[in-house]
Amino acid sequence: MVVTDAIVMRGVSKSFGPKQAVIDMNLTVPRGALYGFIGPNGAGKTTTIRMVMSILFPDAGQLSVLGRPSAVESKDRIGYLPEERGVYKKMRVGAFLRHMGRLKGVPGRGLDAKVRAWLERMDLADCERKRCEELSKGMQQKVQFISAVLHEPELLIFDEPFSGLDPVNTRLLRDLIREQHAAGRTVIFSTHVMPQAEQICEHIVMINKGRKVLDASLPEIKARFDPHTLLVEPLDGSAEIVLSGVGGVRSVSRVDGALEVSLEHGHDPHAAIRAIVQAAPVSRIELRRPTLEDVFIEIVQGTATNGDEAALRAELRGEAEAVAAGEGDR
């Protein structure tokens, strides 16, 4: 029998004491797919991944991984980059990667060359003889990425793979993830930073407070959620005040020299465009499609206050990490 799904979860739940981390999760990830698990920190993404990896076991429900009831039975066909980075600190980088390759069944012949080729690609060629503890956190993260893909697994799972990386290495890792998917591998990665998922994923699973709140492809999401934001370039400096009083306008804010006009939910954007043009002189006005951040906020809006929304948007953009990102990463 040909197994067409890489992961299947049916009614999976997990609690830690009174805390319900994952609630009645139903999920199917087809083979060869590129899925993003997204949601704020503490949403249940990592717990879901750990159950897939058989690090944790569900309190209820069933799951299968690559056609087997446990990831343990398919461990050599899976590559995993956990949220908690972990390398053998006293081992030298090359020795560590060769050790991990042998554990995953990579043939000894050609293993050295394979390790060196990956180190070269990751700009770590001069680190082969260094001990892992001598590397920065970002460099250790790249070493661990190599260990996850070295054996060319069928299924790759990355938990917050971009956390703490500088922009250059974030771009490198993003390209490598796309490359792994293009080679026919199933790829799942989790992130609380929505723009990262939007740049990479074909399919999105949104998780909030332990529950799956959305499971759809990016085109489906864009078709399902109506745009309710306009970008306006005014000709008059007083336009911000004028536009705030236009019917259907929820808020007006300045973004990169233009005005971002958020509309009340359900308000016709085309009617708003006509009203704005009549209310103030503008040089340009355009409809902005909703981002994943917008979609997530709309879904959870009923449980968030305005203050909560501002903090949540900052988290979903990764702004809290901006200062820390890049420290020591090369």
Image (cartoon, helix red, strand yellow):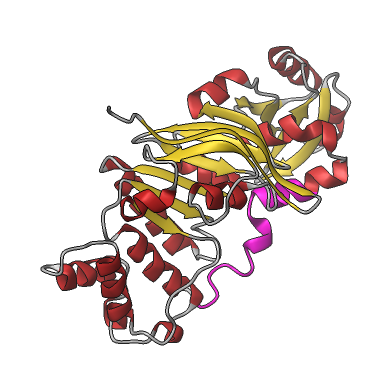
Residue at x 23%, y 61% (from the top left corner): 105
Residue 306 place in picture, x, y as percent: 86, 41
How many numbered marks does the figure carry?
Answer: 0
Residue 226 place in picture, x, y as percent: 65, 20
Place residue 113 in its image quadrant.
bottom left
| Residue nearer the viewer, 93 or 313 | 93
Task: Indicate yes or no whether the magenta region holds residue 111.
Answer: no
Location of the N terminus by quadrant is: top left
| Residue nearer the viewer, 29 or 36 | 29
Residue at x 86%, y 34% (from the top left corner): 241
Location of the C terminus by quadrant is: bottom left
Evaluate whether residue 192 shows in this view.
no
Q: In the image, is 127 to the left or to the right of 89?
A: left
Task: Indicate yes or no whether the magenta region holds residue 317.
Answer: yes
Q: In the image, is 170 to the left or to the right of 16?
A: left
Residue at x 80%, y 23% (from the top left corner): 264
Residue at x 40%, y 67% (from the top left corner): 144
Q: Taking 228 as reference, is 91 above or below it?
A: below
Place residue 246 in its image quadrant.
top right
Residue 155 place in picture, x, y as percent: 36, 46
Give the magenta-colored segment's residue range.
Answer: 311-328
Evaluate whether residue 298 shows in this view.
yes
Q: Taking 155 as reference, is 124 above or below it?
A: below
Residue 173 place in picture, x, y as percent: 40, 57
Q: Residue furthest left?
A: 109
